Amino acid sequence: MKDHATTIYDISELAGVSIATVSRVLNGSPNVSDATRKKVLDAIEASGYTPNAFARGLGLNTMKTIGILAADSSDLYLAKAIYHLERELRANDYDCLLCCTGYELENRKSAIDLLISKKVDGIILVGSNFIYDTDEENAYIVEAARTVPVMLLNGALEAPNVYSITSDDYKSMYEAASELIDSGVTNILYYYNSISYSGKRKEKGFRSALKDRGVTVPENHLQYFDGTREDVPGMAAQLLALHKKGVTFDGVIAADDTLAMSAVKYARTLGLSIPEEFSVIGYNNSMLSTCSDPELSSIDNKLETLCQHLTATLMGVLGGADMPKITVFSGEIAHRKTTRPKTT
Amino acid sequence: MKDHATTIYDISELAGVSIATVSRVLNGSPNVSDATRKKVLDAIEASGYTPNAFARGLGLNTMKTIGILAADSSDLYLAKAIYHLERELRANDYDCLLCCTGYELENRKSAIDLLISKKVDGIILVGSNFIYDTDEENAYIVEAARTVPVMLLNGALEAPNVYSITSDDYKSMYEAASELIDSGVTNILYYYNSISYSGKRKEKGFRSALKDRGVTVPENHLQYFDGTREDVPGMAAQLLALHKKGVTFDGVIAADDTLAMSAVKYARTLGLSIPEEFSVIGYNNSMLSTCSDPELSSIDNKLETLCQHLTATLMGVLGGADMPKITVFSGEIAHRKTTRPKTT
């Protein structure tokens, strides 16, 4: 009847105890009653729980390896995340198996199958683009979590053995838009290039801020860039094409620093002075924000903190502790030279 | 007497045949005479060659995993290299264990020990900063290569079982400097932030070009930036401090695109028009070169090609083929908006 290998999840059901309790027993934790321990060990015996998985649970034969999945490890934001995660995991004596999956669901499924066949101790999905719109599409995450803990960096999904560490993109974007309006910029263009879980939260934050402050912008002031993620000249060309069509704006809120860089290019091409006549806020507070001239104000989403917290949570889970399923950090605006102070 | 596990290298010595021949025998290649095969199998029996390593050699129990070492996986250039390598290796059914080692020799040694204990099939050192000045320091590479093939991306070292895939940084920099001089810029500043193997080759190329064209610059026109690799504002500040001290120059050749970005900032601060009054050439042809305004002319060192070639070479070595020990590709200048055409 079962179409998958017996997992800690099955043992938990069979024994009628939580996954954390099974994990504690497997890890030889003293904080388990003898009766509970017996229930779990009986369930393990009754099930087909494999010696390998058992040994791994006991820490006897663990590979001490975590699988890291990212769409593209050379993306500025994802590369930083991988760097921080690798350092944190290494400090805990874990190795990292890196898989660059691109953005196709099928490739992600096979990467996860591969990692599980390699007996990794856990899987980290880096970036909210791993979360899809439907339960059916997200089933690959739920299924993987039946075997190993799955950590989501900046994505959220409620399922057993899945842990989400996110930055509050809604709130960050809400604050960025509010601040821009309060500085006297109301004819704002919102520029984005991702419709991921995080991308949608950002757009929602932007729309809410406008609504709460009674500001309206035409729908063509929400501009989607469909090109490659590093094509800053292409992004600038799209803004200039809008200008030629008569669409004007005196500020840009960008969902990524690359898009913000293109807005700076746009302003320079038109001879607009920044921030006196034109304001820009970027997102991610990447190295681009200080490369830019003038330097970009940008939302710092505390990536290093997220990675530290994710690793600590994963270590807790692997050690059998009860860990929070969802952790949310707040970002903050790093103010530089492309925004004006409040006028109010 | 031996202070390390028996390796393919020892078998090769013992049998009096090349490593490639031992590898062919272990891989069951038909292109080995019966006499040679017997010599190798006898040597294996006589030695303490471990069943694990033997099985790995036979491809029976290979982990199909390659260790990738990089100082910092979030560095623009290194992140791109890791991305391309991961894709190429994945296409060959190999996984990647990623280790970010920083720049300290001790950390590199322990990362390699760890990878070998994990029974990786090969090791890739990404970036020329893995090559040190002395044989003593580089012994860690020679030693690792006694167990697994070691691939150097953009570094060169002659040792058994070590393979180097490099871009000709000397030639690229020679051509960049020559071109700048031919466009009428002779008061050039050379700006660098690495004294790695590759960094030294670049500087040599710069000096040779000046010498061959009879151009001299004062020694303070070779400027070293000692700060963090992403601190573009700090790089610009150093150039402006030079200007204040009366050191002038009408063009910058940068050993990295970040340094080139800072030269563009410098020119803008002083109100110099690019490229009419001030020229800049960057290095690596990274995303920064198109982020920059005006877009940077930059040396394209063919990173993707290098990564493809490195992977093909490694696959050849693992398959028992004789592969070239050193492969050198030529870079070329990607011309954009920060350089003028030749005047001659």
Image: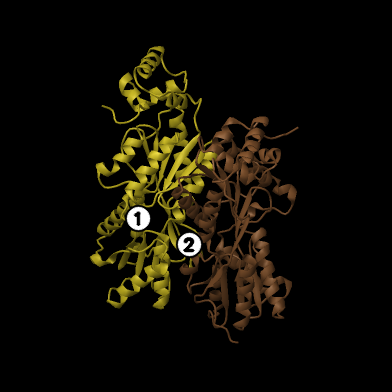
Chain colours: A brown, B yellow
Image quarter of residue A261:
bottom right
Q: Indicate the quadrant containing the N terminus of chain B: top left, top right, bottom left or bottom right.
A: top left
Above or below: residue B333 compared with residue B34: below
Q: Quadrant of the C terminus of chain B?
A: bottom left
Residue A137 visible somewhere in the drawing = yes
Nearest to N terminus: mark 1 or mark 2: 1
Name the residue tied to disc 2.
Answer: B288
Give the labeled residue for mark 1. B173
> Disc 2 on helix, strand or loop?
helix
Asked if residue A116 is positioned above or below residue A245 in the image, the reply reads above
Measured Cα–Cα span from mark 1 to mark 2: 19 Å
Amino acid type, label 1 = Met
Taking the spot 71% from the left edge, 78% from the top edge, the residue there is A212
* Label 1 CA crowd tier, 10 Å (few <14, some 14–19, many 20+): many
Q: Which of B257 and B55 lies nearest the eye of the viewer?
A: B55
Of helix, strand and loop, which one carries label 1?
helix
- Residue displayed at 30% across by 57% down: B206
Question: Closer to the observer: label 1 or label 2?
Answer: 2
